[in-house]
Amino acid sequence: MYNKIFISFLIFVCTQTLFSQSDYELAKKVFQRYQYNEVISLLSKNTKFENLSKKDRLEANYMLGESYRVEENYKLAEKYLLVAKDIDDEHIKTLISLGSVYTKQNQWKKGLKEFIDAEKEDKKNPFIPLGLANVYLEVDSVDKATLYFTKARELDIEGKLSEIFIG
């Protein structure tokens, strides 16, 4: 009798683990295809991500936060990006995304801090000076904004920034 209950419990735990892992793997694929609503649908079912490794929990929270940011749900974006930042406070993509969220919410000082923290970690990422330029543009510091836009363009050796502006 107890063996059947124990075996049923083990099967349940294993299927839950596999379900979470498969949702995460699928979310990674659709995230790469810019299908943010699908990422939200897959990952918002169980946001604790207990069955994932620390690295995967970081990435799951980042993908969920970034997806909410793109969909302009800044409160939920901030929530999941802060969880990702708690896991790794030097994760560049999280810092950039969080800086963008704060900028969109007119929280200039917080946005500036995230972009400056990101710049300390990665001096060659063109999205960081682009984010700084946007913050400075919003606070009417045109000279600093121009300086950072120029720096972003100089760092953009792969031409990724034009994708943002062209589509």
Image: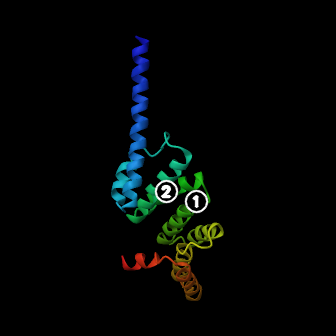
User: Which sits in the foreground, 131 or 162?
Assistant: 162
- Residue located beneath label 2 in the image: 62
Q: Residue at x 49, y 66 (%)?
A: 101
Taking 130 as reference, is 24 left or right? Answer: left
User: Which sits in the foreground, 130 or 102?
Assistant: 130
> What amino acid type is highlighted by mark number 1?
His
The alpha-carbon separation of the residues under discs 1 and 2 comes to 9 Å
Quadrant of the drawing holding the N terminus: top left
Q: Position of residue 67 (x, y in %)?
A: 41, 60
Compare marks 1 and 2 and give the one earlier in the sequence.
2
Q: Position of residue 73 (x, y in %)?
A: 40, 62
Q: Secondary structure at mark 1?
A: loop
**Residue 2 lies in quadrant:** top left
Q: Secondary structure at mark 2?
A: helix
Q: Please determine whether, in this image, residue 117 is positioned above or below residue 150.
A: above
Rendered image: mark on residue 91: 1
Q: Position of residue 38 (x, y in %)?
A: 33, 55
In contact (CB < 8 Å): disc 1 and disc 2: yes
Q: Residue at x 34, y 60 (%)?
A: 35
**Residue 70 lies in quadrant:** bottom left
Q: Please determine whether, in this image, residue 30 is positioned above or below residue 46.
A: below
Q: Residue at x 56, y 70 (%)?
A: 111
Residue found farthest to the top: 1
Q: Position of residue 146 (x, y in %)?
A: 55, 87
